[in-house]
Amino acid sequence: MQLNIGWLYPNLMSTYGDRGNVICLQRRCQWRGLEVNILPLDQENDIQYFHEFDVVVGGGAQDRQQEIVMRDLQGEKATIIKQKLNAGIPGVFTCGSPQLLGKYYEPALGKKIDGLGILDLVTKHPGQNVPRCIGNVAFEIVPPNLAEDIREMTGDCPIIVGFENHGGRTYLGDVSPLGKVISGYGNNGEDGFEGAFYQSAIATYAHGPLLPKNPFLADWLIIKAIEQKYQQKINLSPLEDTLANQGRKAILKKLGLMGNNR
Ligand code: GLN
């Protein structure tokens, strides 16, 4: 078996270390003997890569880079991404990326950036003088189907931990939140929601990077990608995740959430 990992605009949307999500997916596939290719989905590479990815990763970026990305992510590229996410191709999108999957992003400076409209959400930056949402974030998974899958995989439904750093505040329309905030800001620091979840697309403000800190999410994405590509169920062999679990415990302890440790 072989998986193609699409990486959205790696040179523009890697400001906050989300390349770790690509590396985590790649290694967790390789450790199980799965062949993996990494396909840059950007303005410099062949548009054919957009047709070929089986799972997609989008990282975070500063407002200026997001504007540059959206100038390129139009036309056929936008159509392919929409079609594939609507069809259930899995992906993980962090911070600036989900902002671009939404209806629009109003940055602190400059014009409103129209998004792809795949996720029913909008993001508004309250201005450069308003403190950014920065710090550790922890949240419970909300979508029942995702929670059930994770429970089936791990025997539990662990708290997701990460680190957020965003100025934009995101407001959900008719789309499921990814999580219910336990600690941190989440989408906007007001409604208690974090991220969004649509088909098999995970949208979140949690950097960290997210997947090395929550390896069960990486495995969920790999399983979904294989199911979509090969139309077959698969059980992934367990990996040695002691280090990741120790890292999670350290964050949960720091947030005073060890009692909820999962
Ligand atoms: N530039 C966007 C914001 O400040 C996204 C930041 C990010 O990707 N971490 O909200």
Image (tube, rainbow, N blue to C red):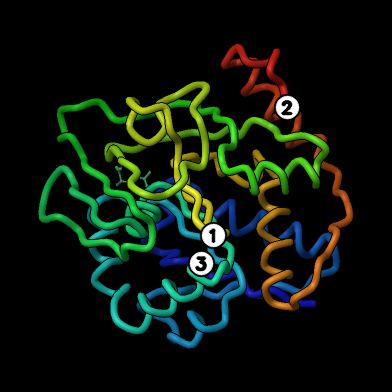
Q: Residue at x 57, y 76 (%)?
A: 53
Q: Amino acid at mark 3?
A: Trp
Where the N terminus falls, by quadrant?
Answer: bottom right
Comparing marks 2 and 1, which lies closer to the viewer? 1
Whole-number angstrom distance, CA of label 3 to CA of label 2: 30 Å
Residue wearing tag 2: 262
Which residue type does callout 2 highlight? Arg
Q: Quadrant of the C terminus?
A: top right
At x 55% / y 28%, what residue is drawn? Answer: 138
Q: CA distance from mark 1 to mark 3?
A: 19 Å
Using a 10 Å C-alpha cutoff, classify the residue at mark 1 as few (fewer than 14 neighbours), some (14 to 19) or many (20 or more): some
**Left or right: where 156 falls relative to 106:** right
Residue 112 placement (x, y as % from top left): 15, 55
Q: Residues within 10 Å of mark 3 (few under 14, many from 20)?
A: many
Q: How many marks?
A: 3
Q: Secondary structure at mark 1?
A: loop
Left or right: residue 242 versus residue 18 is right
- The CA distance from mark 2 to mark 1 is 25 Å
- The residue at which mark 3 appears reads as 7
First of labels 3, 2 by sequence position: 3
Of callouts 2 and 1, which one flags the residue occurring earlier in the amino acid sequence? 1
User: Where residue 237 appears, x then y in whole percent?
Assistant: 89, 55
For label 1, the residue is: 199
Disc 2 residue crowd, few under 14, some 14–19, many 20+, Cα 10 Å: some
First in sequence, mark 1 or 3: give its number.
3
Name the one closer to the observer, 59 or 143.
143
| Left or right side of 238 for 41 | left
Amino acid type, label 1: Gln
